[in-house]
Each structure stands twice: as C-alpha cells, then as structure tokens.
Amino acid sequence: MEIHCQEKFDEVKKYAESIGDQTFNNCIERLKEWEKDGKHTVHLYNDFAKHSFYFQEFDVNGRCVMNGGVIYHEPGNDHSFSVCIDADEMTKPEWRIHT
C-alpha cells in the first residue's frame, strides 16, 4: 500500500486507537489483502471528509481498476456525504470502505 498522506494517516490511526476502535485498522487490512496477488497496488490519499481517505487500486499496467473511500462515520453527526443503510443502528464512530 502506498500512503500519499502519511501525516493524516498517522493522526487518524492514533485517534482510532484513542477511542478503542478496530474498524479503521480492519479497513486498512482489507485493502492490503487486495494486493496479495501481486497484481494490484492500493494507493491511499487524503479526503475532504473528517478522518477519511480516498483510495485507488491499480493493476500491473498502472490502470485504475477500482476506487473508493475509507470513510469515517459518526452516529447522528455524519458529515461524510456517504450513505449507510444501517446508519440508525450505528452506536459509535466507525470506518467503512465505500466503493
């Protein structure tokens, strides 16, 4: 995984740990799984939304084959502009992958 916003990544990781969250790390590990075939690389970029990231997955020819976000959601105060079908059931902040 190539992280193009290391400072923000480190800040978000620290924040997730401070609130006892595992969902951020779980999302990052899922993205890393996509690279295990040796044919794809995931690039992580800053996103405008709080504690969130944009990603692109590239094949060996440098072609973007998927993109999306690792999006931070807060119950009752979600400013991510992303849809969660179970938002009413969310009880604590968490990150999710959106494609």
Image (spheres, rainbow, N blue to C red):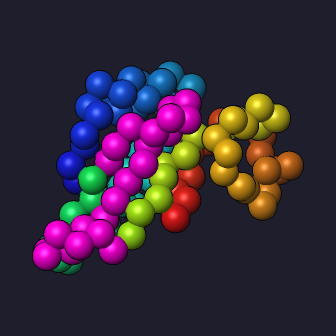
Inspect this view and state whether residue 13 appears.
Answer: yes
Magenta-tinted stretch? 44-65
Inspect this view and state whether residue 17 appears.
Answer: no
Q: Nearer the viewer, residue 14 or 42?
A: 42
Residue 5's spot in the image, x, y percent? 29, 34
**Residue in the image at 41% along x and 63% along y:** 67
Residue 27's spot in the image, x, y percent? 45, 53
Query: Which residue lies most toward the right here?
Result: 88
**Residue in the image at 48% along x and 49% along y:** 70
User: In the rendered view, does 42 fall on the left or right side of 53?
Assistant: left
Residue 38's spot in the image, x, y percent? 14, 74
Residue 55 in the magenta stretch? The answer is yes
Q: Nearer the viewer, residue 77 or 15?
A: 77
User: In the rendered view, does 5 fall on the left or right side of 24?
Assistant: left
Q: Is residue 90 above or below residue 8?
A: below
Residue 73 in the magenta stretch? The answer is no
**Residue in the image at 25% along x and 68% along y:** 58
**Residue in the image at 52% along x and 64% along y:** 99
Residue 1's spot in the image, x, y percent? 22, 53
Task: Give the mark count.
Answer: 0
Q: Nearer the viewer, residue 74 or 16?
A: 74
- Name which quarter of the figure residue 62 lies in: bottom left
User: In the rendered view, does 99 fall on the left or right side of 78?
Assistant: left
User: In the rendered view, does 41 fall on the left or right side of 87?
Assistant: left
